[in-house]
Structures are given as C-alpha cells and as structure tokens.
Image (cartoon, grey):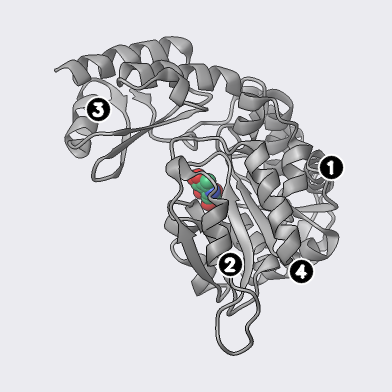
Amino acid sequence: MIDLRSDTLTRPTEAMRAAMARADVGDDVYGEDPTVTELQERVAAMFGHEAALFTPTGSMANVLAVASVVRPGEEVLCDSSAHIARAELGAHGAISGITMRTWTGERGQLDLAAIESMYAPDMGPFFVRTAAVSVENTHNFAGGAVLPLDDLRDLRAWADTTSTKVHLDGARLWNAHVATGTPLADYGRIADVLAVCLSKGLGAPIGSLMVGSADAIDEARVRRKRMGGGMRQVGVLAAAGAYALDHHVDRLADDHAHARLLGEALGLDPESVDTNIVVVDRPDATAFVAAAADEGVRIAAVGPRAVRLVTHLDVSRADAERAALVLSRLVDR
Ligand SMILES: Cc1ncc(COP(=O)(O)O)c(C=O)c1O
C-alpha cells in the first residue's frame, strides 16, 4: 500500500529513534528538561520571537496560541476552511470561550477587504470585539496552498492600525518556507503568535510548538498544565523534533515534486500544486477512494466531492510514480 492519506502517517526513522534514545531528559513541568528547553529556544529564535512552548499536538498549540490573543467573549476571524474552524472540534469555543467569524477565500487565501468589513472594534455592550485574525500557511483543506508573504504583510500592516493580533497556524509553515524560499523569520514577523508542527511533513511522531512573547508563553504554560498537557521527561519526544529540524526540512522539496506528479495524474495543472497536498474535486469521492485502495493507493475523502492526497517522508519517488500511474488510469476509466 502507498499511503497518501496524510503526512502524519510517517514512522520515525532509525536515525530519529537513535536521537530519541540518546536524549538528555528531566521533568519539563519543572522546566528541567534540557532537550525540550533547547528545542523551544531554537524554534523561538527561528521565528524571531522571545519564547516557545512544546505541546503534544498542533491543535493544543493552536488553542493556546489563539487564547493568548483572544479573551473569552471576543472573536477571531479566519477563513471558513481553516483548521481551527473546521477540524479542532470547537475547542476554541468549548475550552477558551471565544467565537469565530469566517470569510471564504479562494483556495484559503486572505481576503483583506472581507476582514476589514467584518472587523468589529470594541463597542462596549453591543458587539463582540474582534481581537485577532488567524491565517493558515500552508492551508490544509485548500490543498497545501501557500499564502503569499506580501498578503501577510498587508494583513500585518492593517492589524497594526486596529490593534488586532495575528495568529498564524503554521502546522506546515516549513513547506511554505521550502516552496517559496521565504525566511522563517519573515513569517515570524507578520504574526503575534504562531503554532508550528513537527509531526506533519517533518516526520516526528509527535510534537508542536506555540511561539510568541515571553509573557504569552508563561501564560500558555499554565493553560497547558490545566488542559493536562504538562509533560515530564518529554525530551525523548523533543529530540525527535530537533532531529527532524536538522534533517527533514530541505527534503520537503521532494514531497512537493511528488505532489505535482500526483496532481498532474489527476488532471490538475501541476503549477497549481504549491506544496505536498493535492485536493481534487471528484463527484464520486468515496467510490474513487475505494477504487484507489483496491489498486494499492490509499487516499482520503475530505468532503462529499473532495479527495485529498498528501506526500511525505515515507513516499519515495518510485511510490509517487506508481501512485500517479494508478490514479491516472482511474481518472481515464
Ligand atoms: C493546518 C493544521 N493545523 C493544525 C493541525 C492540528 O495538528 P494535530 O493533528 O497535531 O492536532 C493540523 C492537523 O492536520 C493542520 O493540518
């Protein structure tokens, strides 16, 4: 089976497991795990922020990050297919007591005009106040689409005029960085707070980080513990993330090339495939997924008419070529 359902399906490599086994550890709730501390400082520096906090999941990093800039009873604006809106099971409302309003961007893109028209300043007892705008780069359900840096800079400039905060869901920001050559610090500059994942394309078995100011991270550390996310000798997991940052960032370019191959096989313009995710409209999504599985290629239906394929560390060039052949035959059937 060639498994293209998600880039979260990777298994740690032998070298990554060896790095995990070697990790120096301590109790991280006491702030005494050197491997975690080093990873947090390293990732904060990569984005030009003061501090970072290791979390088990990207969802927890997002919940903590958004809660650091939006108080209970306030709102965050985001794209209607954003992961925080669609796939975090209402956590931001259920746990943090915040509300969301959404715009619908073409391929998950920013719509500054829509944001400006939705924006609600503090009107006392009349309207919910817009505290933050959240953007996702790359955008998962929009097929791994990259948000152009110029658009993000425009958002930053507008946010500064209204004292609105910017949250960046950068679960796959590494993919945007490799696809465009944009320095990570440039992405860091447009956001007040970020969430990044080590467990997607980078191939770590677990691990994400919230990145932001020292004060926001101090507060998030308390919230993380309250949510049951205070972890102990977790350096064994942070070591996998550090290994991934050392060895698995540049190779994302291979995943992107493989995704273009698959996109082409499905009848898309390969230029429309920005990174490692391909989302294609298929009226017969469920049947198409089942037919591909019968031919040894696992893909996922992410909507009644939407099929998603994701390339990753465990998909070789030969796998991608074989999957492309299978899929192009199914399309022609
Ligand atoms: C864009 C985006 N943000 C956040 C997450 C959440 O990550 P996790 O599954 O680690 O909670 C995902 C997961 O796929 C994602 O695609």
**Quadrant showing the N terminus:** top left
Q: Residue furthest left?
A: 333
101 lies above or below 82: below
Q: CA distance from mark 1 to mark 3?
A: 43 Å
User: Quarter of the image holding residue 280?
Assistant: top left
Q: Is disc 4 in contact with disc 3, using a CB cutoff of under 8 Å?
A: no
Q: Residue at x 84, y 42 (%)?
A: 45
Identify residue type, mark 4.
Glu
9 lies above or below 32: above
Q: CA distance from mark 4 to mark 1?
A: 19 Å
Q: CA distance from mark 4 to mark 3?
A: 46 Å
Which is more N-terminal, label 3 or label 1?
Answer: 1
Residue density around tag 3, few if under 14, some if 14–19, many if 20 or more, within 10 Å: some
At numbered mark 4, what does the secondary structure look like: helix, strand or loop? helix
At numbered mark 3, what does the secondary structure look like: helix, strand or loop? helix
Does the closest atom of ligand 1 sit within 8 Å of the Cβ of label 4? no
Q: Residue at x 46, y 48 (%)?
A: 105
Which is more N-terminal, label 2 or label 3?
Answer: 2
Q: CA distance from mark 2 to mark 1?
A: 31 Å
In the foreground, 256 or 122? 122
Q: Residue at x 61, y 59 (%)?
A: 133
Identify residue type, mark 1.
Ala
Give the number of the mark in front: 1 or 3.
Answer: 1
Q: Is disc 2 in contact with disc 4, using a CB cutoff of under 8 Å?
A: no
Q: Which residue is mark 1?
A: 45
Q: Which residue is mark 4?
A: 219
Residue density around tag 1, few if under 14, some if 14–19, many if 20 or more, within 10 Å: some
Q: Position of residue 150 (x, y in %)?
A: 67, 38
At numbered mark 2, what does the secondary structure look like: helix, strand or loop? loop
Q: CA distance from mark 3 to mark 2?
A: 45 Å
Q: Is residue 177 left or right of residue 260?
A: right
